[in-house]
Amino acid sequence: MVETGQHDVVDIAYDNPDRLHTGIEVLTFDALRSRLKSSVARRPSRLDFHQLLLVRGGEGTAMVDFVTHPCASGTLLHLRPGQVQRLPHGPGGHPAELDAVLVLFTADFPPLLPSARSALDGFGPVAWHLSPGDHAAFDRATTELAAEYATLQTARGATAELTGALLRQLLGALLIRIARLPDPAPHPARGNELHFAFRRELERSFATTRSVEDYAARLGYSPRTLTRACLAATGRTAKQLVDARVALQAQRLLAHTDLPVAAIGRILGFTEPTNFGKFFTRETGRPPGTFRRTQR
């Protein structure tokens, strides 16, 4: 992991110090904590890779995209590229004392498995509290990954290539396990295809349009049909999902960059700073400046 940026900006880019050209790294939470400066570990950071964290013991509180998640034995977190996090911390904001394993991997490292697609998309669940049986299964799976990753450190030639292939398949199996976990916030028809198509289009276009009519036209449906699909999948209307995505990006930029508030508003399609301020306050309950100060 490489830290870039200045002042309060912390970008965490994938960089494996053990195997420079390997798209996966398995390490303990203690190892990660010792690698990062304490000032970085306590501040919001944005990843450009996937991060799985399985807690085996200890307690702490993590933040992912400005939602807090208690961490204890059996907690599983999955962060996707682009999400803003604060590492699990304890009282006083210091990094938590956790017995936990992390699996870091680039988006192109896992094998192409349709059954694992839901575990990799940008709007899947972030946190689960595993049952004892699931926790034991994930513990075994991550232990095997860690063992094979350790083997990779000294492997050469054909052995290294085979070990890398095995790591891909073991990661694929782990992602399938995640895909079949019960949804922590289940809702009827969560997997309907129109909803997923809309969310993918929303990821591409939220900075250029907040119009439900635009999204519906691009997908070849009426706005009413699109809204029904979103309500069935999430309990929220298409307009609510659009506004929530724009507000999330605004939060990420406010917490993670030194851009002026007005510039962030322009990036997200607001021609007037006052309109952006009203929108952000309505969506989050706090003005942009107040939100930024609390994150710093």
Image (cartoon, helix red, strand yellow):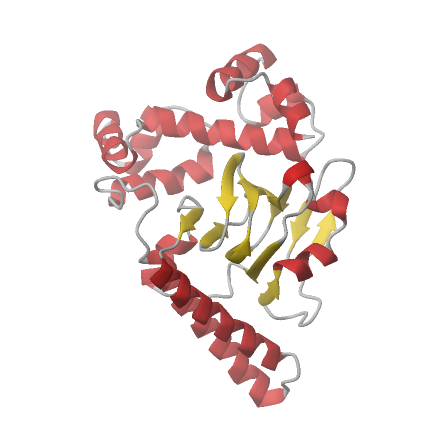
Question: Residue 196, percent across and down?
Answer: 32, 43
* 103 w.r.t. 59: above or below: below
* Residue drawn 51% across the image and 31% down it: 248
Quarter occupied by residue 8: top right
> Does any portion of residue 44 appear in the rendered image?
no
Residue at the far top in the pictured view = 274
* Residue drawn 26% across the image and 28% down it: 227
* Residue drawn 54% across the image and 32% down it: 249
Q: Is residue 59 left or right of residue 112?
A: right
Quarter occupied by residue 273: top right
Q: Is residue 98 left or right of residue 80?
A: right
Q: Is residue 226 left or right of residue 206?
A: left
Q: Quadrant of the N terminus?
A: bottom right
* 59 w.r.t. 228: above or below: below
**What is the number of callouts on the image?**
0
* Residue drawn 71% across the image and 67% down it: 17
* 185 w.r.t. 47: above or below: above
Question: Residue 75, percent across and down?
Answer: 46, 52
> Does any portion of residue 291 appear in the rendered image?
yes
Q: Could you say which is closer to the camera, residue 59 or residue 157? A: 59
Question: Residue 51, percent across and down?
Answer: 54, 55
Residue at the far bottom in the pictured view = 158
* 131 w.r.t. 266: above or below: below
Question: Residue 209, percent across and down?
Answer: 44, 27
Q: Quadrant of the C terminus?
A: top right
